[in-house]
Image (tube, rainbow, N blue to C red):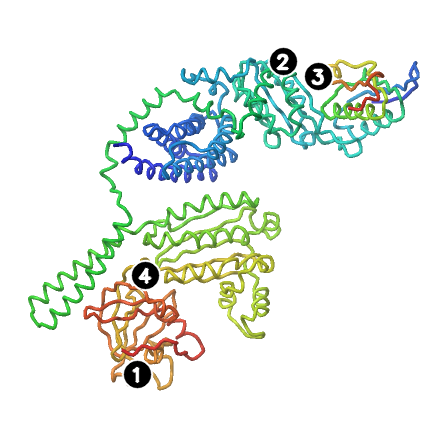
Amino acid sequence: MFLDQALPTFIAESRELLDAMESALLQFALAAPQEDTVNAVFRAAHTIKGSAGLFGLDHIVAFTHVVESVLDRVRDGTVTVAEPLVTLLLSCADHMRALIDTTAAGQYEPNAASTATGSALLDRLQQHLPGALAAAEPVPRVETAVAADAGANNYWHLSLRFGSEVLKNGMDPLSFLRYLGQLGTIVGLETLADALPPADEMDPHLCYLGFEVSFDSTADKAAIEDVFDFVREDAQIRILPPHSRVADYLRLIAELPEQAPRLGEILVRCGSVTAQELAEALAAQAAAATPQPLGSIMVAQGVVPPVVVEAALAQQQQLRGKGQETQTVRVDAEKLDQLINLVGELIIASAGASLTARRAGDAALQESASAVSELVEQVRDRALQLRMVRIGATFGRFQRVVHDVAREIGKDIRLQLSGEDTELDKTVVEKLGDPLTHLVRNAIDHGIEPGALRLERGKPAQGTVRLHAYHDAGNIVIEVSDDGGGLRREKILAKAEARGLIEPGQSLSDAEIYNLVFEPGFSTAEQVTNLSGRGVGMDVVKRNIVALRGSVSLTSTEGVGTTVSVRLPLTLAMIDGFLVSVGKAPFVVPLEMIEECIEYSAAPGHHYTDLRGEVLPFVRLRDVFALDGAAARRQSIVVVRQGGVKAGLVVDALHGEFQTVIKPLDKMFQRADRLSGSTILGTGEVALILDVPALIRQATAAAPPAHTQFSCNN
Amino acid sequence: MNTSIQPAATSALRLRIDGEFSIYRAAELKEMVLTAVAQAPCLELDLSAVSELDTAGVQILLLARQAALARGHSLLLVDSSSAVQATLALLRVSPEVHGAEAGHVS
């Protein structure tokens, strides 16, 4: 059927819309909402509702409709967006995502768990809607069901539990009740003194009383809610519209602190529920095998007139039909990967063809081979670009992480993003999420100090976590920084000594000390407190990054903040390489890291040379890899650079640029830390790709170079 | 604002409070009313000169009622100002414990 085929598209689109909705909502949290961000959120909800209706996913339609109604009121300004509402709407987006996910998994009906979550959210959403809406234009089909379930009374029911500090804040619950009298008539009222403690424990300045009010009024829910505007934060104010279903009263009873039977009586006495209704509902609830949250779905259904939905849908289909599909083509990521693999093979084959042409000595053949390889190079770049994505989408997700975690631990933290347009390979991005999440959480949890401490240190109470990305020498660098307390050098040293990671009295540079937190020994729970939590799983972060041929480093100033820099290759598939050789062994140096090539000159036995007046440390690849054979008569130095540090690599011969398709090293060689991969030359020979950062470190280290365990003798 | 305790006409003790019966005097009033309830098997509260009764005041009256019930004492309102009457009516509460009720600890 047509719809079944379209379902994956619906799911993919809905997820994108939810992403858009989430990021727009998070902007609300940062600043007063702009009209277009509100519209973006509204449109997302509206579109999802419309499409879900097409597929007959009624539970999604029902839920989303209420969300949309609240958003509509935000849009026309009747409801102002404050922090609790943003959080609520975010939870709603999460719920919608969960519903979409279950649909994607093949479940087209709501399950008990999602119904429960949904109805809890709907209840909270209803607080932002005029009471009339719950009963507005009910669908005829559902109306009977609602009517059967609806309470017989015409009154609002208000359940008021004021915050205990309300009196100290200069407000008297009595005045709210009196003011209520101006909006309508208080038909019934019960003062609950249950919370009143024994005389000697009772603080006469705290409020202990609760009120159940049955209220006759033509005012709408918003107007009644506004009465309690000043105390809403600390108080539990629940408002049930007239004709609420008995089930709603039951839920109210369940949520209130007092004993259920007693509250039941009170509601009856207030006149909100008749004794018979209560008894019947309680009996029904007890009889039900699974305690289903009664009826909120019914309310939801009650507010969705299908005719309206259909009209909205038709309109939407028209809108969507125009244009969008011509702009972008959705391609299965796997197809893209296959293409890139093929391009890799093409490059190797083309290198082979060029080589054969050169050997044949036929000028025309050589020319056409070089034209082909030039085109192949362009194809490679385009193919890789297809898989390049902006890092902005990944960064955007952290707005939510920061928002949630900061709330959870009660810190005021904002996330600052820069360099979102920096692109990198999709395969890298996918693997970046976990380590970055870890770093960001670490920064929030342990980096940023509690508000009071920050003020004491003369910093703004609001902490800042920054995510910054930029390109550097064929790599992407992602920095996670915070303006928190920084690492404590002495503590790390002491811990490292205790752990036996360093010798007592060993002198280390700051960078070396901070990098100790990436050691596995620093990742146990015990250190969390000792090291103010840094190093929690940092070894795991490092391992993940290194597995992507990347590196991670950390700088920190005590009291000022910490920056963790993650450096990753742009792609895991291919690079432009530079082919060199030592003896008969070919090596590839990533071209982006090469500054220049110079003639070898150095005093015998020295490990540095004079580069236009600069000291350039170098390593001899022959020594590094313990290769046999005497050095060539005219050796060369390849000058490489990473992150501002230069070093030289001494090689026998330079062969020029070479398109390098990276093949991972076999497991056996993975401990060879001066190699990052291998590739296949046109001749079919295997060339090893040098791990330039590791070689630079070796060249610049004071200690004489150690031989690797790996030796290469081909 | 002055307050007096005098033997009532009957064997009861009469406590007269005037001025504000509110949060501003909550600590003092709590102490006074509870002491009086503890002392008198039958306490008569004269609130005819109370100018204002707020939630804090109502809580103290309800606390006194609890205390009276617990001890089997009775607590009566002999005269109340209109402010007191209005508040008690709005909240549908009364601090009174009559002789018959006394002793039935709820």
> Do tag 3 and tag 1 residues touch (Cβ < 8 Å)?
no
Q: Which residue is mark 2?
A: A187
Q: Identify the residue at image location x=32%, y=23%.
A: A310
Q: Chain of mark 1?
A: A
Q: Which residue is mark 1?
A: A628
Mark 3 to mark 4 CA distance (whole Å)? 78 Å
Residue A488: percent from left, percent from top? 57, 62
Q: Quadrant of the C terminus of chain A?
A: bottom left
Which mark, residue A474?
A: 4
Residue type highlighted by circle 4 = Gly
- Pick whichever of labels 2 and 1 is earlier in the sequence: 2
Mark 2 to mark 1 CA distance (whole Å)? 101 Å
Do the residues marked 1 and 4 share a common chain? Answer: yes
Mark 3 to mark 1 CA distance (whole Å)? 102 Å
- Pick whichever of labels 1 and 4 is earlier in the sequence: 4
Residue A650: percent from left, percent from top? 31, 78
Q: Nearer the viewer, mark 4 or mark 2?
A: 2
Q: Chain of mark 2?
A: A
Q: Secondary structure at mark 1?
A: loop
> Do tag 2 and tag 3 residues touch (Cβ < 8 Å)?
no
Q: Quadrant of the N terminus of chain A?
A: top left
Residue type highlighted by circle 1 = Asp
Q: Nearer the viewer, mark 3 or mark 4?
A: 3
Q: How many marks?
A: 4
Viewer-closest of B101 and A702: B101
Q: Which residue is mark 3?
A: B92
Vertical relation: A314 (above or below) A600: above
